[in-house]
Amino acid sequence: MRLVDWNIQWGRGVDGRVDLIRIVREARALCDFDILCLQEVTRGFHEGQANGGLAGGPSADQFAELAALLPGTTVIDAIGSDLPGVGAAQQRRQFGNAIVSRLPVKQVLRHSLPWLAAPAKPSMLRVALEAVIETDVGPLRVVSTHLEFYSEVQRLAQVTRLRELHEEACDHARRPAKAEKTNSPFADTARPMSAIVCGDFNSAFGDSAYCRMLEPIAGAPTFADAWTCAHPDAPRAATVGLYDHEQWPDGPFACDFIFVTEDLKPHIAGCDVDQNSRSSDHQPLWLELR
């Protein structure tokens, strides 16, 4: 099972050009992925910056664009920031995460993360998109998330919630409820304990939110950093700041991570960062499990 994780900055490269075709092409070249986890995917931010749009002019619906570029896959969306439209179209402006899977998808869950009041700096509602996916290493919960940039207090609350959600899912794994009937929304609640949580944590390697993610969890498998498992003695590979020095003036560091439950550690065949891509301000990561 191969997974790519990438904060794509709505497909805007260091050259300022928005190009989802380039994103998909580079992700495919990185590995023949089964699952693609993305952050900063947009809908309705196409009107131009003067009318509330984003730099470079993304398409009106990047989730639909991904579905067109990746036929035969399931494209799942989760919206964090959902704002009124401006300009002529008045389409709502939505900003969030995606999971694209060519493997069978079972339950899909969209979790709003804590958004504590922090008036000193901007912030937005953040989400964790979860999909239960049947893979060749067994069923997995795959989570694509993106934590708050400005506020450490908000980031820590969001990591705490991710850990609570993991504990809750493991309790469902131990004590599932049976489906009411086949044509009912009351489906079987069983979910696997094995999980991958990936995305832009906006926490540097070794900082508070990163470290909290690795702390033991009562009644649930602990998370491990897949990159560190694959490279136990190597300096951490940067995921931002390599080429975009305007947004990242302090230089390169790692803030994008793929965490796996400890039972998946023996299955890690590889995990790395593409440090050559300039198609976003972040570098893509990949994971292979066998």
Image (cartoon, helix red, strand yellow):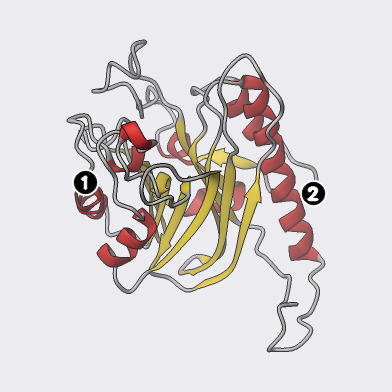
Mark 1 = which residue? Answer: 19
**Residue positioned 27% across, 50% down in the render:** 27
Asked if residue 46 shows in the view, the reply is: yes
| Image coordinates for residue 211, horizontal then vertical, percent | 61, 26
Asked if residue 214 shows in the view, the reply is: no
Residue 189 shown left or right of residue 253 in the figure: right
Mark 2 = which residue? Answer: 219
| Residue placed most toward the observer, 73 or 274 | 73
Asked which quadrant contains residue 127, the reply is top right
Residue 41 shown left or right of residue 47 in the figure: right
Name the amino acid, label 1.
Asp
Crowding near pointer 2: few (<14 within 10 Å), some, many (20+)? few
Q: Is residue 235 above or below residue 225?
A: above
Name the amino acid, label 2.
Gly
Q: Quadrant of the C terminus?
A: bottom left
Crowding near pointer 1: few (<14 within 10 Å), some, many (20+)? some
| Image coordinates for residue 74, horizontal then vertical, percent | 42, 69
Q: Secondary structure at mark 1?
A: loop
**Residue positioned 75% across, 88% down in the render:** 181
**Residue positioned 39% across, 25% down in the render:** 236
Q: Nearer the viewer, mark 2 or mark 1?
A: 1
Q: Is residue 262 above or below residue 140?
A: above
Q: Quadrant of the N terminus?
A: bottom left
Residue 29 shown left or right of residue 282 in the figure: left
| First reached walking from the N terminus: tag 2 or tag 1 | 1
| Residue placed most toward the observer, 98 or 283 | 98
Q: Secondary structure at mark 2?
A: loop
Q: Residue furthest top?
A: 250
